[in-house]
């Protein structure tokens, strides 16, 4: 399954308490997979359960309990739509691949640019 940073951002917003998050365009498998990625990245604490046979990389149950400090730090930079879109454009313009490290750097740059 491909990593989807838009879904990661939406799940983090939901975990923080944002009520207007719409996940209806995603399957439960996509949501659970990305919850597992969020936990692996250290952005949240939770429980990820894989099927006993573990023939897939998609968990059959994923529950995130709370954001970690790192999750709050990332989300504080990423929650503003203008900053988020600017950061993605910075990465795209530089021809870099969209990775969590590139995104963290680009979010910082986007905030500086938008603050003048």
Image: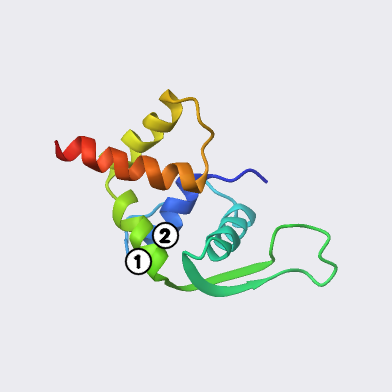
Q: Nearer the viewer, residue 115 or 10?
A: 115
Residue at 43 percent of width and 32 percent of height: 91
Q: Quadrant of residue 37?
A: bottom right
Is residue 106 depicted above or below 46 in this figure? above
Residue placed under numbered mark 1 in the picture: 16
Identify the disc placed on residue 110.
none
Residue at 32 percent of width and 61 percent of height: 19
The percent position of residue 44, horizontal first and vertical second, equals 47, 68
Is residue 35 depicted above or below 3 in this figure? below
The percent position of residue 47, horizontal first and vertical second, equals 59, 75
Q: Nearer the viewer, residue 82 or 53?
A: 82
Q: Is residue 3 left or right of residue 71?
A: right
> Which colour style is shown?
rainbow
Is residue 49 depicted above or below 88 in this figure? below
The percent position of residue 26, horizontal first and vertical second, equals 55, 48
Distance, label 2 to label 1, CA atoms, is 6 Å
> Looking at the image, do the residues carrying marks 2 and 1 touch, with CB atoms under 8 Å apart?
yes
Q: Is residue 81 left or right of residue 92?
A: left
Residue at 49 percent of width and 25 percent of height: 95
| Label 2 Cα neighbours within 10 Å, binned few <14 / some 14-19 / many ≥20 | many
| Label 1 Cα neighbours within 10 Å, binned few <14 / some 14-19 / many ≥20 | some
Q: Is residue 45 left or right of residue 50?
A: left
Q: Quadrant of residue 67?
A: bottom left
Residue placed under numbered mark 2 in the picture: 12
Asked whether residue 53 is in view, the answer is: yes
Residue at 32 percent of width and 55 percent of height: 20
Labels in figure, total: 2
């Amino acid at each position: 399954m491909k990593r989807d940073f838009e879904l990661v951002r939406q799940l983090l917003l939901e975990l923080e308490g944002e009520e207007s998050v719409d996940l209806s365009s995603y399957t439960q498998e996509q949501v659970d997979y990305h919850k597992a990625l969020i936990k692996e990245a250290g952005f949240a604490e939770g429980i990820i359960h894989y099927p006993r046979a573990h023939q897939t990389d998609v968990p059959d149950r994923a529950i995130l309990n709370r954001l970690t400090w790192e999750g709050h730090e990332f989300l504080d930079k990423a929650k503003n739509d203008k900053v988020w879109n600017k950061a993605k454009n910075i990465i795209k313009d530089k021809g870099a691949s969209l990775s969590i490290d590139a995104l963290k750097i680009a979010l910082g740059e986007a905030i500086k640019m938008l603050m003048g």
